[in-house]
Amino acid sequence: MFEVVGVRFKKAGKVYFFDPNGITLQKGEFAIVETARGVEFGAVVKGNTMVEDEQVVQPLKQVLRKATKEDIAQQEADHQKEQEAFAICEEKIAKHDLGMKLVDVEMTFDHNKLIFYFTADGRVDFRELVKELASVFRTRIELRQIGVRDEAKMLNGIGICGRPLCCASFLGDFTPVSIKMAKEQNLSLNPTKISGICGRLMCCLKYEEDVYEELNRKLPFVGDIIEVPDGTGEILAVNVLMQQVKAAVRKKENDPPTIAFYHVDEVKVIRSKKSRKPKPEPKPEGKKGKNKEDVLDLDLDG
């Protein structure tokens, strides 16, 4: 077990653990800590607590001190300098006619580095830009290219749900999201309806995925031939959340079908349209190279 404090450097940013170094910190306070980038100012989101060894990445950096009023005032002044650096950098980008969009600027608390975050369609030759920025600010300059999801997280905005973006509000890390999740939840596959303002699949598709996977495992497929208390029939549709199936059922073979709804517990599958068995593992490659049966099928669903 290790004693740690959890510190966050940005709103909705990742929480990092630090060695409290004998200092007692409470949630909501500020601290000056040592990081790989240098000395940083951060907000304490988890006070002194004991965690398991596997939750800690060694070696732990230390808390240098609890932030003072002077430290907080300096942090506010640094934010003003970051805005000025942002405007200057945009002028330099326009001067050099570079195909990049400046997103954010960060200054380390010890003023040893200025980090400029930008997006671009491809690689950008910004060597001359770095030289000019270094001559203006007299400090180390780092230009870091980020993706569209990181850009949305930094800039924030309103999602199609009418609420502030999850990534900018509370998500510390991005989790992989696939089109398979939308299919599992029976959502429209229209890109405009399942994509966020970043243009990527919405992070919230992941929230209920585990529940849908569990519920879908209990349901038969559309097209399955089933037996129910009223007779036998074919499934026309399924309702995942209500755990119901809609089926065309005949009491006798020559009777006209009737449409009815049944709970999954009342349904017995006689013949399934699809198999839920996992795909077989690909065979190992032989000495003479790959055969036709050795080629791994790609799962186009995900």
Image (cartoon, grey):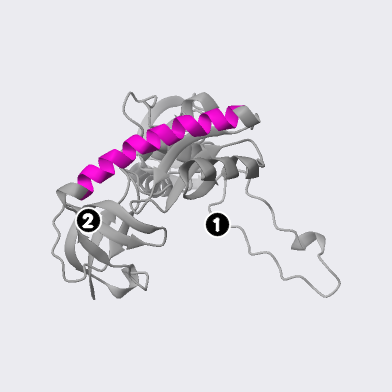
Task: Using the rendered view, name the quadrant where residue 261 is placed.
Answer: top left
Q: Give whichever of 123, 197 is nearer the camera.
A: 123
For mark 1, give the secondary structure.
loop
Residue 31 - label: 2
Q: Give whichever of 64, 212 is nearer the camera.
A: 64
Q: Residue at x 38, y 59 (%)?
A: 38
Residue 204 x, y percent position in the rendering: 39, 38
User: What is the three-letter code of the residue carrying label 1?
Assistant: Lys
User: What is the three-letter code of the residue carrying label 2?
Assistant: Ala
The mark nearer the N terminus, 2 or 1, is 2
Could you tell me how far apart the alpha carbons at marks 2 and 1 are, in whole angstroms?
Answer: 53 Å
Residue 230 x, y percent position in the rendering: 38, 35
Residue 231 x, y percent position in the rendering: 42, 37
| Quarter of the image where the C terminus is located | top right
Q: Residue beneath label 1, please?
A: 277
State yes or no: residue 25 in magenta: no
Which label lies toward us, 2 or 1? Answer: 2
- First to last magenta residue range: 71-94
